[in-house]
């Protein structure tokens, strides 16, 4: 197997895509997403091979007959790599490579490869390296099965039955060495990432007094374009999957003159390898600690509903399923079927339609975020010392002062304020806060 797997890179390689669907299951999307992933990695897709199977075969996943047919297509199209839209075991990959005589990758390996080529910062590179090692570790046993695992006749003793001391073959020795090296490297990566995580946690804690937004969404939905439109982030924008892996946080001034912080996150995808979700947990902490998630949806995609499900699945995995969410229907200006957009608006009546590229709907988005920022408007009666100017400044900046009565050293203020800003007012230690009306 190793002769085909000197590298996982698929850039500039001719690829055949394979999708195996269990009978009675979903017919899939004609490998559209796998095509986008392969092309994003730089491969040239020359053929697609989608097959229904009754059961998953332990040796080749799709069965010997279909594997032989695949080998014929490999020769016909001069392919360099076969990419499966399924997760394969190392044994299945090895058997398939012996039949088709070229490199075989599964979906998770392809995504890991894309992440590896996109990683630019030290943190992103460490996260990808950790994900790759954690993906590889449980597969080491089958990767070395082409070598002897036990040497010697064995004999009739219990020790001899399992090889005994001094009878272990090259396979088991190499496996032990690899496991030890991989374990050591995983430990080193986790230790280094833990240090970075602590710095990120301190950064997040330092923003405690500010309202925090986080952009989440399917890869290539337009999150980076939106961040650039709202702020001076200057994030590179490309029409490809996983163009951005690194989190960027910028200040955004809402229509009411309120400063909030908005962060971008790595894009999600259907069946995102859980190793990546775990490794990028620090990056996704921005979502965990956000006050509001902006779910950017590619309204022009025919797979928008499936993409929404994939994003919600990842959000649930990282513990964000209960976070307040505002759906943002991006690319509304290039929607081909108005009925699709109307369906999304029916399902998400509070969603805002925008075009991050042209700026359409940005003012409406700002107003919607402002409404979420304020929450329900409360009528308050606040008592504080006249010397506590911060209370009055806060009420003017975040709400509306209706009346102020001064007596001796205190001031009694009637004001309107959003419920979400009430904790911020309390941190300024006024003498008394009374909610007159909700």
Image: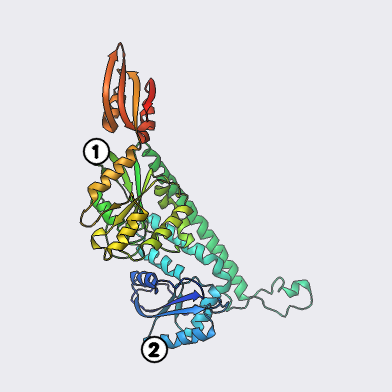
Q: Is residue 224 above or below residue 250?
A: below
**For residue 184, side relative to residue 269 (left or right):** right
Q: Earlier in the sequence, mark 1 or mark 2?
A: 2
Query: From what the image shows, is residue 296 above or below residue 51?
Result: above
Q: Residues within 10 Å of mark 1 (few under 14, many from 20)?
A: few
Q: Position of residue 227 (x, y in %)?
A: 28, 52
**Viewer-side residue, 5 vs 350:** 350
Residue nearest the viewer, comparing 205 with 88: 88
Query: Horizontal and vertical percent for residue 147?
Result: 59, 78
In front: 137, or 237? Answer: 237
- The structure residue drawn at horizontal position 21% and vertical position 53%, both measured from the top left corner, is 360
**Measured from the top left, where is residue 431 in percent x and y?**
38, 20
How many marks can you see? 2
CA separation, marks 1 and 2?
Answer: 63 Å
Q: Is residue 59 above or below residue 263?
A: below
In the rendered image, is residue 296 in sight? no
Give the residue displayed 51% in from the left and 67% down from the top. 136
The local crowd at label 2, few if under 14, some if 14 to 19, many if 20 or more residues have their Cα within 10 Å, is few
- What is the quadrant of residue 120 in the picture? bottom left
Secondary element at tag 2:
helix
Does residue 409 appear anywhere in the picture?
Answer: yes
Q: Position of residue 66 (x, y in %)?
A: 50, 84
**Residue shown at the point (48%, 72%) measured from the top left:** 86
Q: Secondary structure at mark 1?
A: loop
Determine which residue is flagged by label 2: 76
Which quarter of the rendering shows the C terminus?
top left
Choose top left, top right, bottom left or bottom right for residue 408: top left
Residue occupied by mark 1: 256
Q: Residue furthest top?
A: 408
User: Taking 375 as reference, is 336 left or right?
Assistant: left
Taking the spot 27% from the left edge, 38% from the top edge, the residue there is 258
Q: Going by the image, does 355 lie left or right of 43?
A: left
């Amino acid at each position: 197997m190793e002769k085909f797997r000197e590298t996982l890179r698929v850039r500039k390689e001719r690829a055949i895509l394979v999708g195996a669907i269990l009978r009675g299951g979903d017919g899939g999307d004609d490998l559209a997403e796998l095509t986008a992933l392969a092309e994003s990695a730089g491969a040239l897709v020359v053929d697609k091979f989608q097959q229904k199977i009754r059961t998953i075969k332990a040796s080749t996943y799709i069965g010997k007959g279909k594997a032989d047919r695949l080998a014929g297509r490999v020769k016909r199209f001069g392919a360099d790599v076969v990419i499966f839209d399924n997760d394969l075991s190392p044994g299945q990959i090895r058997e398939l490579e012996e039949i088709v005589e070229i490199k075989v990758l599964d979906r998770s390996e392809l995504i890991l490869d894309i992440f590896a080529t996109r990683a630019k910062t030290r943190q992103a590179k460490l996260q990808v390296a950790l994900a790759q090692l954690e993906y590889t570790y449980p597969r080491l046993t089958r990767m070395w099965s082409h070598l002897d695992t036990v040497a010697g006749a064995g004999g009739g003793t219990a020790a001899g039955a399992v090889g005994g001391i001094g009878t272990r073959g090259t396979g088991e020795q190499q496996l032990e060495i690899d496991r030890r090296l991989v374990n050591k490297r995983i430990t080193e990566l986790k230790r280094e990432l833990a240090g970075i995580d602590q710095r990120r946690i301190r950064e997040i804690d330092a923003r405690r007094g500010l309202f925090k937004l986080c952009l989440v969404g399917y890869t290539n939905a337009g999150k980076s374009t939106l961040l650039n439109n709202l702020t001076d982030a200057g994030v590179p924008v490309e029409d490809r999957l996983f163009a951005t892996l690194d989190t960027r946080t910028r200040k955004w001034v809402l229509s009411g003159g309120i400063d909030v912080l908005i962060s971008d996150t790595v894009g999600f995808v259907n069946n995102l390898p859980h190793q990546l979700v775990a490794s990028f947990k620090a990056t996704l902490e921005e979502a965990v600690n956000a006050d509001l998630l902006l779910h950017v949806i590619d309204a022009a995609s025919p797979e928008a509903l499936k993409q929404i499900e994939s994003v919600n699945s990842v959000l649930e995995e990282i513990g964000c399923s209960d976070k307040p969410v505002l759906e943002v229907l991006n690319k509304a200006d290039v929607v081909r079927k108005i009925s699709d957009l109307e369906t999304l608006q029916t399902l998400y009546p509070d969603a805002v339609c925008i075009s991050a590229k042209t700026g359409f709907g940005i003012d409406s988005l700002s107003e919607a975020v402002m409404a979420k920022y304020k929450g329900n408007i409360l009528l308050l009666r606040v008592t504080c010392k006249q010397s506590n100017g911060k209370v009055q400044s806060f009420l003017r900046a975040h709400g509306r002062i209706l009346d102020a009565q001064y007596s001796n050293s205190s001031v009694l203020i009637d004001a309107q304020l959003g419920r979400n800003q009430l904790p911020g007012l309390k941190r300024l230690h006024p003498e008394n806060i009374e909610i007159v009306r909700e």
